[in-house]
Amino acid sequence: MEFLSQAKKFGVRSLLLQGLTFLSVLTSAFMIWKGLSLFTNSESPVVVVLSGSMKPAYDRGDILFLHNGFSPIEVGEVVVYKLNDKPIPIVHRVMKVHTESESGEQYLLTKGDNNNADDRGLYNPGQMWIQRNEIIGRVKGFVPYAGMGTIWMNDYPYLKSVLLGTLCVLSLFSND
């Protein structure tokens, strides 16, 4: 009942304006993301480090900025790759590069700085190298711990629900 009285108080036009404002913010965010994807040649130009496998270079919660240039990848570069069967991208350093002389195709072996072994155990069964087309991007910069909110929302799903619910209620009943 209180919702209906609030809706009548603000009027239909005001609620429609709030809804359109919300949609324009979402649309703008999507356009910025797609623009960054085109500019960086990466399907995901920004990622959050989810584990401690890259310590001390990158900690859990660091935001990484990626670029997927066309130049060959070199040993020592930190790359983000995604395997076909795994939904979460992996951030690790290139340890070895094998380039086929005929085709120029690159095959990479990666390893986390804080891991004892290379990533062959993470690759798909029977896969010994990752290919260039599995690389999402190369790390070009980072912001320490700026992605901890994302990690908290993944670790505690109820926090995500509470935050989204609060934002929806505030957007519906704000006077601006």
Image (cartoon, rainbow, N blue to C red):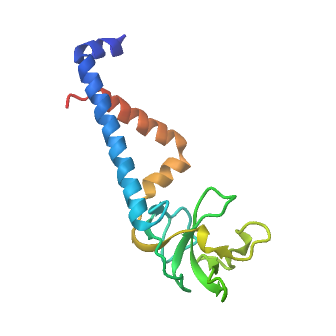
Q: Position of residue 6 (x, y in %)?
A: 28, 16
Q: Position of residue 79 (x, y in %)?
A: 53, 74
Q: Position of residue 1 (x, y in %)?
A: 37, 10
Along the line of sight, which residue is nearer the eye, 47 or 117?
A: 47
- Residue 33 appears in the figure: yes
Along the line of sight, which residue is nearer the eye, 158 or 67?
A: 67
Q: Position of residue 131 (x, y in %)?
A: 64, 74
Position above or below: 170 against 155: above
- Residue at the location (61% across, 68% down)? 134
**Residue furthest bottom as drawn:** 101
- Residue at the location (54% across, 42% down)? 157
- Residue 146 appears in the figure: no
Along the line of sight, which residue is nearer the eye, 95 or 41?
A: 41
Position above or below: 135 against 171: below
User: Left or right: where does residue 11 sit relative to residue 148?
Assistant: left
Question: Looking at the figure, which quarter contains the C terminus?
Answer: top left
- Residue at the location (39% across, 48% down)? 30
